Amino acid sequence: MKFETKVVRAGVRPDPTTGAIVPPIYQSATYVLEQVGKDKGFDYTRSSNPTRQLLETNLAAVEGGRYAACFASGLSTVDAILRLFNPGDHIVSSDDVYGGVSRLFNEILSRYGLKFTYVDSSDARNVARAIRKNTKMVWIETPTNPLIKVTDLEAVGEICRKKKVLFGVDSTFATPALIHPFDFGADLVMHSSTKYVSGHNQVIGGYVVMHSKKMYEHFRYMQKSVGAVPSPFDCWLVLTGIKTLSLRMARHSENAMAVARFLENHPKVKRISYPGLESHPQHGIARRQMKNGYSGMMSFELKGGLSAGKKLMNAVRLCSLAESLGSVETMITHPATMTHVSVPKKERLARGLTDGLVRLSVGIEHKDDIIRDLKKALDA
């Protein structure tokens, strides 16, 4: 099936009991066994649930993998991935990652012996130089959060193959509608389903897709043993949202390009980062590996710095001042005080994440209305 068909139909069948075209929500904590030691494939929802199983089948097909495992959040998904490793193991990570991931790596997992090196992965040579004898995985976020840097996945994939280390990709910003990291050698592809995949600001969730059955068994064990799993209702909401993913991403990308061009030419904007713009440092890489658009995420900085950025965010009306991203609504964020507040200021500034940086998640409203709202706020 083509991608647009997969998001709607992959793994989905009419309910065998009633013929309902929409899969039912199996909102049950436990299941009655036919006899001792004999069940119908389910015994307790922490271990497995029919609604979650259906979603995982759909997500694996959409991403182009063999298996998928869903978790209660994007962060719990990342945590489950890092539990593949042992004390003393080393991970090379993109330096510009979501602040919650930095907090998880630096303040929690490092206490249990995992070692981390952060590099600007937009230059693949930095990744190669950072790999050590005890490196077990390269972790790439592309485009990054919030600086919107792009990594050449083909180049990093080749490095990982030669060095024999796992290649993990957080593809939340791009989504499987625009890029398939497995085509570039990824071993694991992770998404926060809170964002574009569900797309409607209704649910918190995450998932990881893989080809390896051994890895899949690890994630199934993590679901059962740690219990950070999504509820059946949350799974159903993601299943419902993903059906329109290809349509939404086309609109997000179209709107974002128009907004980015408006901001790029505005006299009060100091700099803007959007992969679709020719001025983006990695535009050529993005054009080569992102198909059908460049997503709805961008960041920019005003000439007035922090003060101007705060005034802008307090003046918008259509653009909602909110923590999240990837929804049908346009949302604006101040990373230094919101999404990345847990990153130490010295480290944050070293990464280029300044006090005046603004992150914009462009929604699917009419592009003229979004631009008009930003223009009024900039004029103010």
Image (cartoon, rainbow, N blue to C red):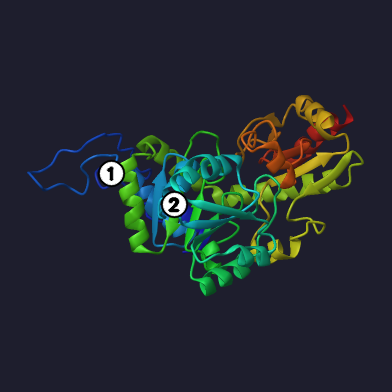
Residue 267 against residue 247 in the figure, above or below: above
Q: How many marks?
A: 2
Q: Kindly give the residue lying farthest to the bottom in the view shown.
A: 162
Of callouts 1 and 2, the N-terminal one:
1
Residue 59 relative to residue 32: left or right: right
Which is more toward the observer, 105 or 122? 105
Residue type at the position of mark 1: Ser
Residue 248 in the image: state x and y as whole percent. Answer: 60, 47
- Residue 73: mark in rendering: none
Q: Which label sits in the foreground, 1 or 2?
A: 2
Q: Which residue is mark 1?
A: 47
Q: Quadrant of residue 341?
A: top right
Judging from the image, what secondary structure is the residue with disc 2 in? Answer: helix
Residue at point 59% right, 60% down?
179
Badge 1 density bin: few <14, some 14–19, many ≥20, Cα 10 Å? some
Residue type at the position of mark 2: Ile
Answer yes or no: do the residues labelled 1 and 2 have beta carbons within 8 Å? no
Judging from the image, what secondary structure is the residue with disc 1 in? Answer: loop
Residue at point 37% right, 45% down?
21
How far apart in space, not on screen, are marks 1 and 2 (Cα)? 17 Å
Residue 353 against residue 136 in the figure, above or below: above
Badge 2 density bin: few <14, some 14–19, many ≥20, Cα 10 Å? some
Residue 37 in the image: state x and y as whole percent. Answer: 10, 47
Residue 22 in the image: state x and y as whole percent. Answer: 38, 43
Which is more toward the observer, 91 or 63? 91
**Is there any visible trace of residue 107 in the rendered image?**
yes
Q: Kindly give the residue lying farthest to the left in the view shown.
A: 35
**Is there any visible trace of residue 9 in the rendered image?**
no
**Quadrant housing the C terminus:** top right
Residue at point 53% right, 74% down?
162
- Residue 81: mark in rendering: 2
